[in-house]
């Protein structure tokens, strides 16, 4: 097999890894790989970096996993999922940051998404909008157990996954300060409907994994609470990122044990 185009990776490089941890930011990839090595030992190796997609291979005991960045939003995430699936990956764990919208959620807490409101476009290229964007129960369970074991405060529930950071998340601190009518009042409506937070990738990731018969989940560290204020400080970003990475790293062991569930992966065994 030649290299997949955007990730610039070929099958033999990933050495049959089936689990990928997926931050948005390519610069977070080595940090996550180092956290995996600190916890589990073994070795880490940079494999490729093209555009927003950086990939590291982590190996410990007989296990292998990847850390691959998605870039921001559904379109770039869809490419990463598509190309990793082509290479044989069957479990996708997004490790992100997020803006909470419920008062009880604190900065540094993590949100484990059970399902996402599809406020994006990319996911509609894979399934009609009525199709639910759901996390896989094994990934959700592993993340809950991991957050508990690390004593990280966590919340499980529904996420609004938007294509845009500004209007789609009803932010008025933009260039025009204008939010189109469709999104005016949307933040309050999601609050009333019990949605926990905003982020930008799970709609595409979960919809794709669902229709492909693969596993996906997301743990996101809270870096701002929109029920309070709008600005994101460096300290809040660091805390949110750190706790999401800790929870994801602790979930790795459980996910590797829970095995693979995809039809394709089962057939390949
Ligand atoms: N990521 C988002 O998409 N929204 C936020 O408010 C914070 C992080």
Image (cartoon, rainbow, N blue to C red):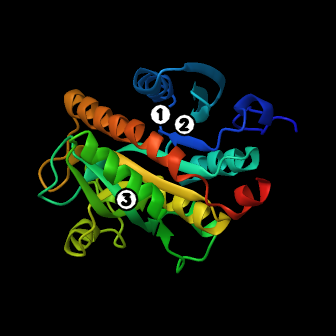
Residue 220 position, x and y percent, is 35, 47
Mark 1 or 3, closer to the camera: 3
- Determine the CA span between mark 1 and mark 3: 19 Å
**Residue ranking furthest to the right:** 1
Q: Secondary structure at mark 1?
A: loop
- Is label 1 in contact with label 2 (beta carbons under 8 Å)? yes
Question: From mark 2 to mark 3, how far is it between C-alphas?
Answer: 19 Å
Disc 3 target residue: 113
Q: Is residue 175 left or right of residue 202?
A: left
Where 252 sits versus 104, above or below? above
Q: Tell me, yes or no, if residue 262 can be seen here.
A: yes
Question: Which residue is depicted at the point 11% across and 51% down?
Answer: 228
Tell which circle, 1 or 3, labels the residue nearer the N-terminal end: 1
At mark 2, the secondary structure is loop
Give the residue at the far bottom of this rendering.
Answer: 130
Q: Residue 219 got which mark?
A: none
Label 1 belongs to which residue?
25
Q: Position of residue 141 (x, y in %)?
A: 39, 57
Q: Is mark 2 within 8 Å of ligand 1?
A: no
Q: Is residue 207 above or below residue 238?
A: below
In front of the other: 208 or 137:
137
Pointer 2: what residue? 69
Residue in the image at 78% along x and 39% along y: 4
Residue 96, by quadrant, is top left
Q: Between 192 and 20, which is closer to the camera in this rendering?
A: 20
| Residue 147, x across and y down, in percent | 29, 46
Tell me which corner region of the image, top left, top right, bottom left or bottom right, holds residue 179.
Answer: bottom left
Q: Note whether ligand 1 is within 8 Å of mark 1.
A: no
Instruction: Decide if residue 165 is in sight here.
Output: no
Q: Nearer the viewer, mark 2 or mark 3?
A: 3
Residue appearing at x 20%, y 41% in the figure: 151
Q: Secondary structure at mark 3?
A: strand
């Amino acid at each position: 097999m030649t290299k997949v185009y955007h990730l610039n990776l070929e099958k033999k490089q990933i050495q049959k890894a089936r689990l990928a941890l997926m931050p948005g930011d390519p610069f977070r990839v080595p940090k996550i790989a180092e956290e995996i090595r600190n916890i589990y030992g073994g070795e880490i190796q940079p494999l490729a970096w093209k555009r927003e997609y950086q990939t590291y291979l982590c190996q410990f005991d007989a296990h292998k996993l990847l850390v691959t960045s998605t870039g921001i939003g559904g379109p770039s995430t869809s490419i990463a999922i598509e190309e990793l699936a082509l290479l044989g990956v069957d479990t996708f764990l997004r490790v992100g940051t997020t803006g909470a919208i419920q008062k009880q959620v604190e900065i540094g807490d993590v949100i484990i998404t059970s399902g996402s409101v599809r406020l994006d476009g990319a996911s509609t290229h894979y399934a009609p909008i009525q199709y639910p964007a759901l996390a896989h129960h094994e990934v959700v369970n592993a993340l809950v157990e991991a957050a508990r074991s690390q004593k990280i405060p966590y919340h499980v529930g529904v996420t609004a996954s938007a294509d845009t950071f500004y209007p789609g998340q009803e932010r008025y601190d933009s260039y025009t300060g204008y939010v189109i009518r469709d999104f005016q009042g949307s933040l309050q409506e999601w609050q009333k409907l019990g949605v926990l937070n905003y982020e930008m990738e799970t709609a595409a990731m979960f919809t794709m994994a669902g229709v492909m018969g693969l596993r996906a989940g997301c743990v996101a560290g809270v870096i701002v609470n929109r029920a309070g204020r709008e600005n994101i400080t460096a300290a809040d970003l660091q805390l949110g990122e750190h706790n999401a990475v800790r929870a994801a790293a602790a979930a790795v062991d459980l996910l590797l044990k829970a095995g693979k569930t995809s039809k394709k992966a089962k057939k390949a065994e």
